[in-house]
Image (tube, helix red, strand yellow):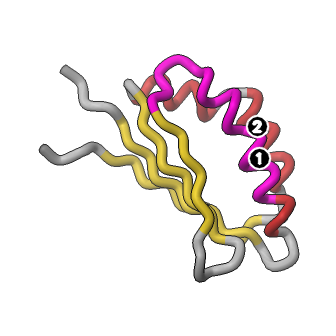
Amino acid sequence: MTKPLTIVATIQALPGHENDVEKALLEVIPPTLAEPGCIQYDLHRDLQKTGLFLFFENWSTREEWDAHMESSHLAAMKKATDGKLEETIIFQMAKVD
């Protein structure tokens, strides 16, 4: 049996763009949760570092996450945050049993 794919993505907004970035990230959640294979898609805000967000995601398969990465709502989020991000780091992980 294939293990679910866990994604941990950190997104750092540039100073002054925190609200715009948060709005764009929030808008992508409902359509993502409706995607095939999306088990979990939670957005978190760092309590100590301004403008730092983290997505914690679980997907049934890598292929379903790959399809998510090509989705129109993710493309819209990328367009809305263009020029407003300092850094995005994506970790692709599997649970250790």
Q: Residue at x 87, y 76 (%)?
A: 16
Which is the main secondary structure of the residues drawn in magenta?
helix
Q: Which residue is mark 1?
A: 78
Q: Is residue 33 magenta?
A: yes
Q: Kindly identify the amino acid type of the residue bearing the numbered disc 1.
A: Lys
Q: Residue at x 81, y 52 (%)?
A: 23
Residue 87 appears in view:
no
Question: Is 88 located above or below residue 48 in the figure?
Answer: above
| Residue 90 located left or right of residue 17 | left
Label 2, label 1: how far apart the Cα atoms are: 5 Å
Q: Residue at x 44, y 46 (%)?
A: 7
Labels 2 and 1 touching (C-beta < 8 A) = yes
Q: Which residues are magenta?
A: 21-39
Question: Is 58 located above or below residue 26 in the figure?
Answer: above
Q: Which residue is mark 2?
A: 75
Which image quarter: residue 70? top right
| Residue 96 located left or right of residue 34 | left
Residue 44 appears in view:
yes
